[in-house]
Amino acid sequence: LSRIKKQFPPGPAIENYEAFLELGRRDFTAAETRLRGMIPRYQSNRAAYDRFLNLFAGVLAVRGKMAEANRTFERLAELRRGSGSPAPLLNAQLRRVIADASYGSDHRVAKAQLDESLRASSLEQLPERERPVMIAIRASVAVGDRERAGRLLDQIDRNLGSAPRRYGKYIRQLARGFVLSMRDEALHQAIAAFTKAEPFCGFCAQAPMARAFDRLGLPDSALVYYTKWVEGGEESWDGGPYYLEQANAYFRLGELYEAKGDKTKAIDFYGRFTELWRDADPEFQPRVKEARRRIAELLKARG
């Protein structure tokens, strides 16, 4: 990136790469600051404005700023309503559902949003190559809609929709892992599917695979895959907000290490969580307070 910046003039492409670098490193505070400054500068550049709004909404959701995230998703939806195609608008609406379901207290609200979005813009009405089937699967899983998730899984087996064809076998396995993980009796099958998807998108597959092991009562295996997730960084923000459970993963890592008696690592991950959510919305602050309480107790016990 440093070499590119020396050879090319400043502009939205360079700033986009700089934001990706921060997102890949999970420096969401820096990414938020950068995007907050970029968005006003590029309002006259429709493509850049769309991309940066999309990224910004995701970063806000990761940081627990859901009220502002939803306002940003609304701005993005309004921009896309004039695009001439319903597919970009539906994509933004589905990503908002994922964000709301990741941290919202009432999944019924997110499910109602999903139902309304798919009524207004049915996947079947879109050209096959424009259908955000994978995003719809993620949204259905996030709200706990097993029936719809199963139907969409059958659909993606026949047609990948807007997903890249060259990664088809991995994307189908990732989708299968998400859908199977909705049922406790299918967790082993979900893990097998996530394992096959891992070469395509490690950070997409490793954290949900860790959760599956955790639900099976295998905390050591969960820690193996959470550790891979922590060390690998993130690489799929080029499509915008997709996997938004970073805060949940950090908090759970703190709990798992605390249960193992590893106070240093527990403090580390509770600390990452509190840093990520230090400015989160008021309804999330009790969880931040709880993490800080645990850090204080662990520090006292460690002496």
Image: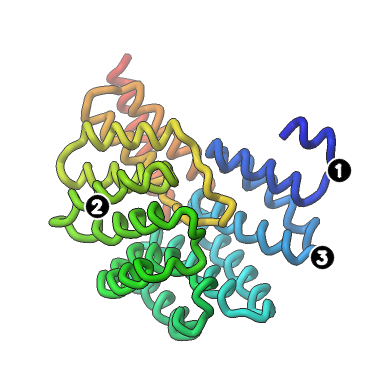
Residue shown at 35% from the left, 62% from the top: 142
Residue 149 is left or right of residue 104, and the answer is left
- Residue 36 in picture, x, y percent from top left: 69, 52
Residue beneath disc 3 = 44
The amino acid beneath tag 1 is Pro
- Residue 278 in picture, x, y percent from top left: 50, 43
Quadrant in the picture for the N terminus: top right
Residue beneath disc 1 = 9
Q: Is residue 106 visible?
A: no
Which of marks 1 and 2 precedes in the sequence?
A: 1
Residue shown at 44% from the left, 66% from the top: 160
Local secondary structure at mark 3: loop
Between 123 and 56, the one lying in front of the other is 123
- Residue 47 in picture, x, y percent from top left: 72, 63
Which of marks 3 and 1 precedes in the sequence?
A: 1
Which of marks 2 and 3 precedes in the sequence?
A: 3
Between 163 and 247, the one lying in front of the other is 163
How many numbered badges does the structure rendering display? 3
Q: Which mark is drawn over residue 190? A: 2
Mark 3, Cα crowd under 10 Å, few <14 / some 14-19 / many 20+, is few
Local secondary structure at mark 2: helix
Outermost residue, front side: 166
Q: CA distance from mark 2 to mark 1?
A: 46 Å
